[in-house]
Image: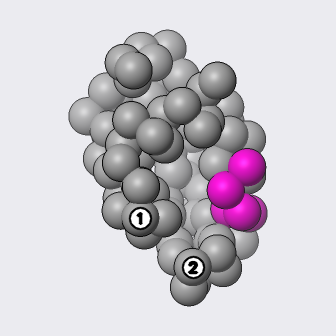
């Protein structure tokens, strides 16, 4: 599955909530998300519209690694 090209930071935050991520703080245009699933994990998400493709790819890779799944499996979980 291809990475969506028009995803906003706000939309990504809503989709990551499916995996147990919740906002813990905000500094300017960046949110910090924390998940306690499979151990504590923190992410920083820029609230840009749209997210740059490289930034989104890096975030998705880190989340997939933390959850022990491939990036393609993660994309199907978040976007299907």
Mark 2 crowd level (few <14, some 14–19, many ≥20, 10 Å Cα)? few
Answer yes or no: do the residues labelled 2 and 1 have beta carbons within 8 Å? yes
- In magenta, the rendered stretch is 18-22
User: Quadrant where the N terminus lies?
Assistant: top left
Q: Where does residue 66 sit, x and y in percent of width and height? A: 42, 68
Q: Where does residue 39 sit, x and y in percent of width and height? A: 56, 85
Numbered disc 2: secondary structure: loop
Kindly identify which residue carries mark 2: 38
Q: Where does residue 69 sit, x and y in percent of width and height? A: 41, 55
The reply to whether residue 15 is visible in this rendering is: yes
Mark 1 crowd level (few <14, some 14–19, many ≥20, 10 Å Cα)? few
Where 37 falls versus 32 (above or below)?
A: below
Q: Is 21 one of the magenta-colored residues? A: yes
Residue drawn 35% across the image and 62% down it: 65
- First in sequence, mark 2 or 1: give its number: 2
Disc assigned to residue 51: none
Where 48 falls versus 61 (above or below)?
A: above
Give the CA separation, mark 2 to mark 1: 9 Å
Residue sitting at the far bottom: 39
Residue drawn 73% across the image and 41% down it: 14
């Amino acid at each position: 599955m291809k990475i969506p090209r028009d995803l906003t930071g706000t939309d990504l935050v809503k989709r990551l909530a499916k995996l147990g991520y919740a906002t813990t703080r905000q500094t300017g245009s960046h949110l910090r998300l924390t998940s306690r699933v499979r151990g504590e994990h923190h992410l920083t998400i820029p609230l840009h519209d749209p997210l740059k493709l490289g930034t989104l790819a890096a975030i998705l890779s880190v989340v997939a690694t933390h959850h022990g799944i491939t990036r393609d499996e993660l994309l199907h979980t978040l976007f299907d």
